[in-house]
Image (tube, rainbow, N blue to C red):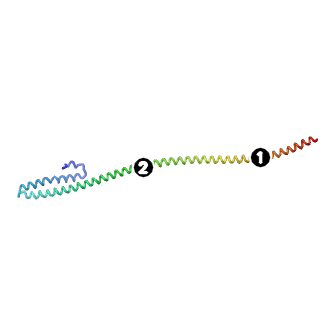
Amino acid sequence: MASEADFGDTSCSWFVCLCYRFERLVSPGLNATIESARAGDAGRGFAVVASEVKILAQQTAKATDEINEQIAAIQATTTQAVTAIENISTTIRTLNEFSATIASAVEQQGGATHEIVHSVNRASAGASEVSTNISGVARMAEETGQGASQVLSASSELAQQAEKLQGQVQAFVAQVRSA
């Protein structure tokens, strides 16, 4: 049998100790039955009390066994609950790690998106500058075309005047030779 001190650290230790004390009545009940049988008729009253003590001790032993079974079942259920809680805790830690990984990836995506926007803005500014430059070149080409037209017109006019002058010079030279 276990001593009362062995049960001091368990839950329900007060009840187990009480049951232990009742179990200890079984031996005195048996001893009392034996002694009353030896005493004969004089021990009959004692035998009745001893029989009642023995019945009470047997009932207590049976109740103690049932309670021990219930305690074992509660302990098994508690162990299962602890295991389930540990599994839930592990799952939560895993989910936290996934969440941290996802948050990091989202942050990296945000940085990459920011860089893309910045690059697109720079490209847009460059395209705008190129467009402005092309417009300037087109304007200059148009102005150059107009200038070329003016030069062509002036050279045509100059060619006509040169022809006219040549005709006048030839007429003058012919006059001078005929004179």
Q: Amino acid at mark 1?
A: Leu
At label 1, counting other C-alpha atoms closer than 10 Å, the crowd grade (few under 14, some 14-19, many 20 or more) is: few
Q: Residue furthest right?
A: 179
Q: Is residue 179 left or right of residue 75?
A: right
Q: Is residue 93 left or right of residue 22?
A: right
Q: Position of residue 5 (x, y in %)?
A: 21, 48
On residue 81, the disc is none
**Mark 2 or mark 1: whose residue is earlier in sequence:** 2
Q: Amino acid at mark 2?
A: Phe
The reply to whether callout 2 and callout 1 are in contact (CB within 8 Å) is: no
In the picture, residue 57 is in which quadrant? Answer: bottom left
Q: Tag 2's secondary structure?
A: helix
Q: Residue drawn 21% across and 55% down?
A: 65
Q: Tag 1's secondary structure?
A: helix
Q: Position of residue 121 (x, y in %)?
A: 57, 48
CA distance for labels 2 and 1:
78 Å
Q: Position of residue 58 (x, y in %)?
A: 16, 56
**Quadrant where the C terminus lies?**
top right
Relative to the observer, which residue lies in front, 44 or 178? 178
Q: Residue drawn 74% across and 46% down?
A: 148
Q: Residue drawn 37% across and 50% down?
A: 90
Relative to the observer, which residue lies in front, 43 or 69? 69
Q: Residue drawn 61% across and 47% down?
A: 127
Q: Which residue is mark 2?
A: 98
Q: Which residue is mark 1?
A: 152
At label 2, counting other C-alpha atoms closer than 10 Å, the crowd grade (few under 14, some 14-19, many 20 or more) is: few
